[in-house]
Image: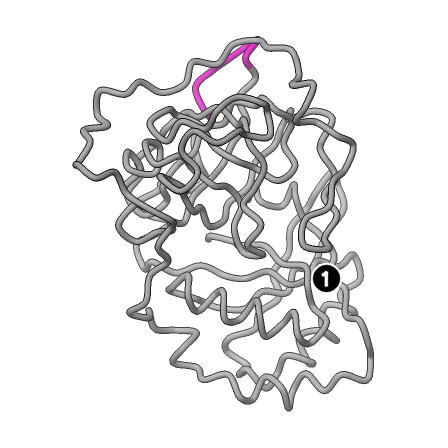
Amino acid sequence: MHEAVILRLAQVSSPHINLGQALTSLVLATLLGACGVTEKRDGLPEKPVDVSSIPDAVPRVEAPSPYGNPKSYVVDGNRYYVMDRSDGYFERGIASWYGTKFHGQRTSGGEPYDMYAMTAAHRTLPIPTYVQVTNLRNGRKVIVRVNDRGPFHPNRVVDLSYAAAKKLGIVGTGTGLVEVRAIDPKAPKEEPVLLRSASASTSTGSFYLQVGAFANLANAKKLKAQLAAMGEALVRITQAVVSGQTFYRVQIGPITSVEAADSLVNTLAGLGIADHQIVVD
C-alpha cells in the first residue's frame, strides 16, 4: 500500500503511563459507530453556488512563494517544517474546508483567499504545490493549488476551499476521507491506478488509525500490548516493506466516523502518543 511511504514512529512519552486503565474508558461503540455530530467550517455562501462550472486548477511551473515557505514555523506551540520539494508526496487522511470567514483574507502565499477558487491549505507542502484530491467515499477527484497553511487540527491533512470541497461532496458533512497526491507541473500525468478502487476501499466506510511503525516486531508487539484494553480485535499489527526494509505497523480500528477518530486521537495524545496517520485498506 502506498501510505507506507510516509510511515512515522509513534513516541510514547513515558513507560509508566498505564494505557490499559486509561483506554478502558473508551466505549467500543464510539469507535465502531458513526456519531450524529458533524464538523461545520465557518460559513456557506448566502446563495447556493453552482461549482460545476469552476474548472480545476491547471498545474504549471511557478516560482516558490517568497512569503509562504519558511524553513519552519510555529502555530499553537507546534513547530512545522516546510518540505523542500513535493515530489512523490502521497497521503490519505481527513480533509476539512474553509469558507466565508476567511474569504478575501491574505493567504500564507500572499494572495487573497478566494473560496470559489480551486485552492487548498497544507501544513508542510511547498507553496505553491498542485495536488489531486480524491474523495475515498465517492471517488470524485479535483486538482487544487496549495497556497495557504493549515489545517491545524491534529487529525486533518488538508483544508480545501469551499469550491473544491463542494465538488468533492464534503461541504455538508464538514469533513471527508481523502487521498492527496502531489502533481509534478513539469510532467503532469494520469495518476497511478490505486491498489483498490475508491468504491472498493470504502465499501464498509471504515479506516484505521496507525499509531506506530517499527523495524523491530518486538516493539510493535509491546505497543499493541499497551493498547490491549481497547480489545484484542481492535488493535492489529500489519507489515509493509519500504525500500527493502520491513516495518511492523500498529493500527487501531476499524473506525467508521471522523468524530470517533478525533476522540481517539485526543485520548491517545493525553497518553503521550501524539503521532498517528489514517490508513485505508
Instruction: Say above or below: 236 vs 227.
Output: above
Crowd around label 1: few <14 · some 14–19 · many ≥20 (10 Å): many
User: Residue 45 vs residue 8: left or right?
Assistant: left
Depth check: 258 or 217 in front? 258
Residue 163, above or below 176? above
Q: Give the quadrant of the N terminus.
A: top right
- In this view, the residue in front, 157 or 87, is 157
Count how many numbered circles sit on residues in the image. Answer: 1
Q: Which residue is mark 1?
A: 10
Residue 86, horizontal then vertical, whole percent: 64, 26
Q: Is residue 216 left or right of residue 125?
A: right
Residue displayed at 35% across by 55% down: 40
User: Front-most of 30 and 254?
Assistant: 30
Q: Position of residue 196 (x, y in %)?
A: 40, 42
Q: Which residues are magenta?
A: 185-192
Residue type (three-letter) at the residue carrying disc 1: Ala
Residue 20 percent coordinates (x, y): 65, 87
Left or right of 111: which side holds 237?
right
- Is-magenta flag for residue 71? no
* Residue 171 place in picture, x, y as percent: 30, 45
> Which of the 4 quarters of the picture holds residue 214?
bottom right
Q: Residue at x 37, y 39 (%)?
A: 99
Q: Quadrant of residue 88?
A: top right
Q: Residue at x 58, y 23 (%)?
A: 110
- Looking at the picture, does residue 245 appear above or below residue 141? below
Q: Which secondary structure, mark 1? A: loop
Tell me which colouring the rendered structure shows: one colour
Prevailing SS of the magenta stretch: loop
